[in-house]
Amino acid sequence: MRLNDALRKAQGLGLDLVEVAPTASPPVCKIIDFGKFRYDISKHTKDRKPASAKLKEIKFRVNIDEHDYLTKIRHGEEFLDRGNKVRVQLQFRGREMAHQEFGMQLVEKVRDDLSGMSQVEMDPKITGRNITMTLAPLPANRRKRKFTPASKTSEQGEQAVARSET
Protein backbone atom coordinates (compact mmCIF):
# COMPACT_ATOMS: atom_id res chain seq x y z
CA MET A 1 0.00 0.00 0.00
CA ARG A 2 1.30 3.49 -0.75
CA LEU A 3 2.28 5.82 2.09
CA ASN A 4 -0.36 8.46 1.25
CA ASP A 5 -3.14 5.83 1.15
CA ALA A 6 -2.01 4.35 4.49
CA LEU A 7 -1.90 7.81 6.15
CA ARG A 8 -5.39 8.65 4.86
CA LYS A 9 -6.77 5.32 6.08
CA ALA A 10 -5.17 5.80 9.56
CA GLN A 11 -6.58 9.35 9.88
CA GLY A 12 -10.00 8.08 8.78
CA LEU A 13 -9.97 5.53 11.63
CA GLY A 14 -8.63 8.07 14.15
CA LEU A 15 -5.44 6.05 14.69
CA ASP A 16 -1.74 6.46 13.92
CA LEU A 17 0.51 4.94 11.26
CA VAL A 18 3.48 3.44 13.13
CA GLU A 19 6.63 2.07 11.46
CA VAL A 20 7.25 -1.29 13.15
CA ALA A 21 10.21 -2.69 11.18
CA PRO A 22 12.18 0.11 9.49
CA THR A 23 15.05 -2.16 8.40
CA ALA A 24 12.81 -4.54 6.45
CA SER A 25 12.56 -4.19 2.69
CA PRO A 26 9.98 -2.64 2.21
CA PRO A 27 9.52 -1.09 5.71
CA VAL A 28 6.61 -2.52 7.71
CA CYS A 29 3.95 -0.19 9.21
CA LYS A 30 0.86 -0.75 11.37
CA ILE A 31 -2.24 1.32 11.92
CA ILE A 32 -2.60 1.40 15.72
CA ASP A 33 -3.10 3.75 18.66
CA PHE A 34 0.43 5.06 19.31
CA GLY A 35 -0.19 5.76 23.03
CA LYS A 36 -1.27 2.17 23.61
CA PHE A 37 1.70 0.93 21.57
CA ARG A 38 4.17 2.84 23.79
CA TYR A 39 2.39 1.60 26.94
CA ASP A 40 2.69 -2.02 25.80
CA ILE A 41 6.41 -1.57 25.06
CA SER A 42 7.01 -0.09 28.53
CA LYS A 43 5.18 -3.05 30.12
CA HIS A 44 7.39 -5.53 28.22
CA THR A 45 10.62 -3.80 29.26
CA LYS A 46 9.46 -3.67 32.88
CA ASP A 47 8.77 -7.43 32.83
CA ARG A 48 12.29 -8.16 31.57
CA LYS A 49 14.04 -6.48 34.51
CA PRO A 50 15.36 -9.13 36.90
CA ALA A 51 13.83 -9.10 40.35
CA SER A 52 16.19 -8.08 43.11
CA ALA A 53 17.70 -10.89 45.11
CA LYS A 54 15.56 -11.92 48.04
CA LEU A 55 16.94 -12.76 51.44
CA LYS A 56 16.16 -16.29 52.58
CA GLU A 57 16.88 -17.49 56.10
CA ILE A 58 18.02 -20.84 57.44
CA LYS A 59 17.88 -21.40 61.19
CA PHE A 60 20.12 -23.86 62.99
CA ARG A 61 20.51 -25.04 66.55
CA VAL A 62 23.80 -26.11 68.12
CA ASN A 63 22.88 -29.77 68.58
CA ILE A 64 21.39 -30.37 65.12
CA ASP A 65 21.34 -33.93 63.79
CA GLU A 66 23.42 -34.72 60.68
CA HIS A 67 20.40 -35.54 58.50
CA ASP A 68 18.61 -32.32 59.47
CA TYR A 69 21.83 -30.40 58.83
CA LEU A 70 22.16 -31.86 55.32
CA THR A 71 18.53 -31.05 54.55
CA LYS A 72 19.04 -27.42 55.56
CA ILE A 73 22.28 -27.22 53.54
CA ARG A 74 20.45 -28.55 50.46
CA HIS A 75 17.79 -25.86 50.93
CA GLY A 76 20.56 -23.27 51.23
CA GLU A 77 22.13 -24.47 47.99
CA GLU A 78 18.74 -24.30 46.29
CA PHE A 79 18.19 -20.71 47.47
CA LEU A 80 21.66 -19.68 46.30
CA ASP A 81 21.16 -21.45 42.97
CA ARG A 82 18.07 -19.31 42.38
CA GLY A 83 20.15 -16.19 43.01
CA ASN A 84 18.87 -15.39 46.51
CA LYS A 85 21.00 -14.33 49.44
CA VAL A 86 20.96 -16.59 52.49
CA ARG A 87 21.07 -15.53 56.12
CA VAL A 88 22.34 -18.31 58.35
CA GLN A 89 21.10 -17.91 61.91
CA LEU A 90 22.13 -20.14 64.78
CA GLN A 91 20.07 -19.88 67.97
CA PHE A 92 21.26 -20.69 71.46
CA ARG A 93 18.77 -21.69 74.13
CA GLY A 94 19.28 -21.97 77.85
CA ARG A 95 22.61 -23.45 78.86
CA GLU A 96 23.83 -23.67 75.26
CA MET A 97 25.17 -20.12 75.72
CA ALA A 98 27.94 -21.56 77.90
CA HIS A 99 29.53 -23.17 74.82
CA GLN A 100 29.38 -20.56 72.08
CA GLU A 101 32.45 -22.09 70.45
CA PHE A 102 30.31 -25.06 69.31
CA GLY A 103 27.96 -22.63 67.61
CA MET A 104 30.84 -20.86 65.87
CA GLN A 105 32.19 -24.24 64.69
CA LEU A 106 28.80 -25.10 63.20
CA VAL A 107 28.52 -21.74 61.41
CA GLU A 108 32.05 -22.21 60.02
CA LYS A 109 31.04 -25.69 58.81
CA VAL A 110 27.99 -24.18 57.05
CA ARG A 111 30.23 -21.57 55.43
CA ASP A 112 32.66 -24.25 54.21
CA ASP A 113 29.88 -26.51 52.90
CA LEU A 114 28.25 -23.66 50.96
CA SER A 115 31.55 -22.20 49.71
CA GLY A 116 31.04 -23.71 46.24
CA MET A 117 27.80 -21.76 45.84
CA SER A 118 28.39 -18.55 47.78
CA GLN A 119 30.70 -15.97 49.20
CA VAL A 120 30.46 -14.50 52.68
CA GLU A 121 28.79 -11.11 52.62
CA MET A 122 28.68 -10.63 56.38
CA ASP A 123 31.02 -12.59 58.63
CA PRO A 124 29.51 -14.58 61.53
CA LYS A 125 28.84 -12.37 64.51
CA ILE A 126 27.26 -13.00 67.87
CA THR A 127 24.29 -10.83 68.75
CA GLY A 128 22.57 -11.77 71.98
CA ARG A 129 21.56 -15.42 71.80
CA ASN A 130 22.16 -15.72 68.03
CA ILE A 131 25.03 -16.04 65.60
CA THR A 132 24.21 -14.52 62.22
CA MET A 133 26.02 -14.75 58.89
CA THR A 134 24.91 -13.62 55.42
CA LEU A 135 25.93 -15.41 52.21
CA ALA A 136 25.63 -13.98 48.69
CA PRO A 137 25.45 -16.25 45.62
CA LEU A 138 28.45 -16.61 43.33
CA PRO A 139 28.01 -15.85 39.62
CA ALA A 140 26.10 -18.65 37.90
CA ASN A 141 29.12 -19.96 35.99
CA ARG A 142 31.18 -20.44 39.20
CA ARG A 143 28.55 -22.24 41.31
CA LYS A 144 29.19 -25.89 42.19
CA ARG A 145 26.71 -27.88 44.26
CA LYS A 146 28.10 -30.37 46.78
CA PHE A 147 24.85 -31.74 48.20
CA THR A 148 22.49 -32.51 45.34
CA PRO A 149 19.17 -33.98 46.36
CA ALA A 150 18.72 -37.59 45.27
CA SER A 151 16.02 -37.87 42.62
CA LYS A 152 13.02 -39.98 43.56
CA THR A 153 13.12 -41.99 40.34
CA SER A 154 16.67 -43.20 40.98
CA GLU A 155 15.79 -44.09 44.58
CA GLN A 156 12.79 -46.12 43.41
CA GLY A 157 14.96 -47.90 40.84
CA GLU A 158 17.54 -48.77 43.47
CA GLN A 159 14.83 -50.13 45.78
CA ALA A 160 13.42 -52.29 42.99
CA VAL A 161 16.89 -53.70 42.27
CA ALA A 162 17.42 -54.44 45.98
CA ARG A 163 14.09 -56.28 46.17
CA SER A 164 14.84 -58.38 43.09
CA GLU A 165 18.23 -59.45 44.50
CA THR A 166 16.72 -60.86 47.72
Image (cartoon, rainbow, N blue to C red):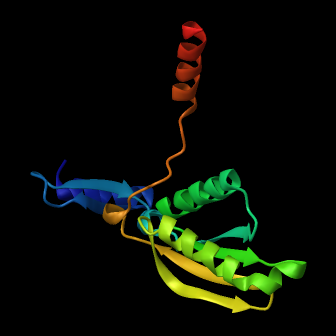
Residue appearing at x 40%, y 71% in the figure: 138
Using the image, determine if residue 85 lies above or below residue 75. below
Residue 130 visible in this rendered orientation of the protein: yes
Determine which quarter of the picture holds residue 56: bottom right
Q: Which one is in front, 13 or 151?
A: 151
* Residue 52 at x, y percent in the picture: 52, 74
Residue appearing at x 60%, y 81% in the figure: 133
Determine which quarter of the picture holds residue 29: bottom left
Q: Which one is in front, 59 or 106?
A: 106
Mark count:
0
Is 124 left, or right, of 127 in this rendering? left
Give the position of the C terminus as an image quadrant: top right
Is 69 left, or right, of 112 in this rendering? right
Most extreme residue toward the right is 94
Residue appearing at x 88%, y 80% in the figure: 95
Is 16 left, or right, of 62 in this rendering? left
Using the image, determine if residue 107 lies above or below residue 123. above
Residue appearing at x 74%, y 71% in the figure: 62
Most extreme residue toward the left is 25
Q: Which one is in front, 98 or 20?
A: 98
* Residue 51 at x, y percent in the picture: 52, 69
Residue 87 visible in this rendered orientation of the protein: no
Is 166 left, or right, of 15 in this rendering? right
Q: Which one is in front, 84 or 90?
A: 90
* Residue 41 at x, y percent in the picture: 41, 65
Using the image, determine if residue 19 lies above or below residue 107. above
* Residue 61 at x, y percent in the picture: 76, 69
